[in-house]
Image (cartoon, grey):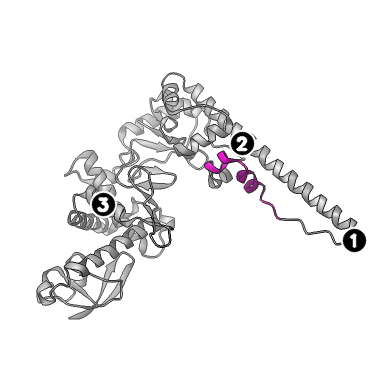
Amino acid sequence: MGVARARGAFGDHRVGCVFWPDTLGVEPWRDYDGLHYYGMPGVVGAQPATSAGANPGAATGENASVADSELDKNELQLLQEIYGVLRKDGSAYKTKDAKTQKLVDDVAAYVSDRDAYFGSADDYKTYRATAKAELDADGAKLRRFIEPPLNSRKGEKWKDAQEVFYAWVRKGYEKEVGAGTDIPKLIRSGMSEAMKEALKKVETSYGKKFKAGGMNPRPMKLSGKYRLGTLSDHATGTAVDVDASSNPQIPSATWSAILKYTGKSLDHATRKSKWKSKPKDLYDTIKEISDEFVKKVGEAVKKEEEAAKKEQQAAEEAAKKAGKPAPKPKKVDALDAAIAKDADLKKVGKAFISKYHKTGFLGLEWSLVEAFHKAELTWGATYPDVDLHHFSL
C-alpha cells in the first residue's frame, strides 16, 4: 500500500491510499489505465484492475459505477471548458435537472454517443490511451498541431482535454481514411497537394495576396463549438478559411431569422444552385441581405436613442417646473432595447448582432470569391449553415 498521485481529468490529484500488487513495481500510479478510481479526487480508494481479490468489490459494482460516472462527468465538463462541444447533429449536451429544472450537462447522452462511436466503454479507454501515447511521442510534437490554440493553453487542464479531443478526431480520421493509416503523419503533412494547387490558381486569378487558414485536425464546427463524431474537411487539408472574423458561419436558424427580419429570401437550395450557375447573383444577394441588416438595425437603434433622449428632456422639463434638480440621464442600451422589441432580432441573438450590426457579415470582395469559383472550389455559403469564410475542394 502507498500514497500516490494519479493523472486525472483535472490534472494530478492525490488519491490517498492505493493498493497494488508487487507486479506493478514501485510507481504503479504511472499506469493510469491500470487503476480504478472511485469517488472524487482526494478520496481514499484507488485500486489496480488486477487486485480485486485483495479488496473484493473495490473495482466492481456500485463503487466502480460511481467512479466511472464521476470521470465521465469531469470529462464532459473539461471538454466544454476548453473546447465547447456539441452532439454530432449540432444539438447541445444539455438536459433539465429534475430538482432545479435548470439546464445541466447531459453526461448520459455524451457517454452513449462516445461509447457507440468507439465501440464500447472499454474500446474508448484503450483508444484514448493510444491517442495519449501519440500526443506524447517524440517530445509531444503532435500536441502543437491539435487545438486548443497555443495562446490559450494555460495551466495543465488543456492537456487532459486535448487527449479526449484527439481521441475523437483520430477516430474520425480512421472512419474517413481507414484503420491502419498513420494519423500523426497525415496530420503533420498539412494541406493537401490538390488544395495547394487550387490556391495557386486563386491567387493568380485574384491578382493579390490573401491569408487562408488551412490544415486543422478537428471536428466540424457550429457557432464556434465542435460537433463530436464528425471530421472537418480542414482535417484532411481540403478546405481553407478566409477572414473568418468578418465572414461568420451563420447557423440555419439564425439565417432564417435574418431573412425574416430583412424581408429577403435565399434558401439552401437556391444558394447551391446559384453557386453553380450564377455565383455573382449569390454573392450580390448575400451582400444585399447583409447591407439591409445593417440598415434596419441601425434605424432601430437610432429610434431607441431618440426615444431615450426625448424621455430625458421631458423629465428635465418636469423637474424644472417643479423646482427640482434635473434628473441624471438614464443609461440606456439602445441596441438592447431594439432587440427586445423585435421577435426576429431576438432569434438572431445579441452576440451576433453586436458583432455585425455596423459592419455587416460579408467582408469578402467579389473578386476573391470569383477567383475561388473559377478554381472550382465550393463556397460555404452553399451549406445549410451559411459558412461565409469557408471554401473547400
The residue to which callout 1 is attached is 323
Please tell me how crowded label 2 is: few (under 14), some (14-19), or many (20+) other residues with Cα within 10 Å: some
Task: Check residue 340 for magenta coloring.
Answer: yes
Residue 54, image x, y percentages: 11, 77
Please tell me how crowded label 1 is: few (under 14), some (14-19), or many (20+) other residues with Cα within 10 Å: few
Q: In this view, does 47 lie above or below 356?
A: below
Residue 373, image x, y percentages: 43, 25
State which mark lies toward you, 2 or 1. Answer: 1
Q: Could you tell me if residue 207 is visible in this image?
A: no
The furthest residue to the top? 277
State which mark lies toward you, 1 or 3. Answer: 1
Q: In which quarter of the image is the N terminus?
A: bottom left
Q: How many labels does the image show?
A: 3
Question: Which amino acid does the dot numbered 3 rest on?
Answer: Ser
Q: Which mark is residue 198?
A: none
By secondary structure, the bulk of the magenta-drawn segment is best described as helix
The residue to which callout 2 is attached is 294
The numbered mark, 1 or 3, whose residue comes first in the sequence reads 3
Q: Alpha carbon of mark 2 to alpha carbon of mark 1: how far?
A: 43 Å
Q: Is mark 3 on a helix, strand or loop?
A: helix
Between 193 and 323, the one lying in front of the other is 323
The residue to which callout 3 is attached is 112
Magenta stretch in the rendered image = 331-347
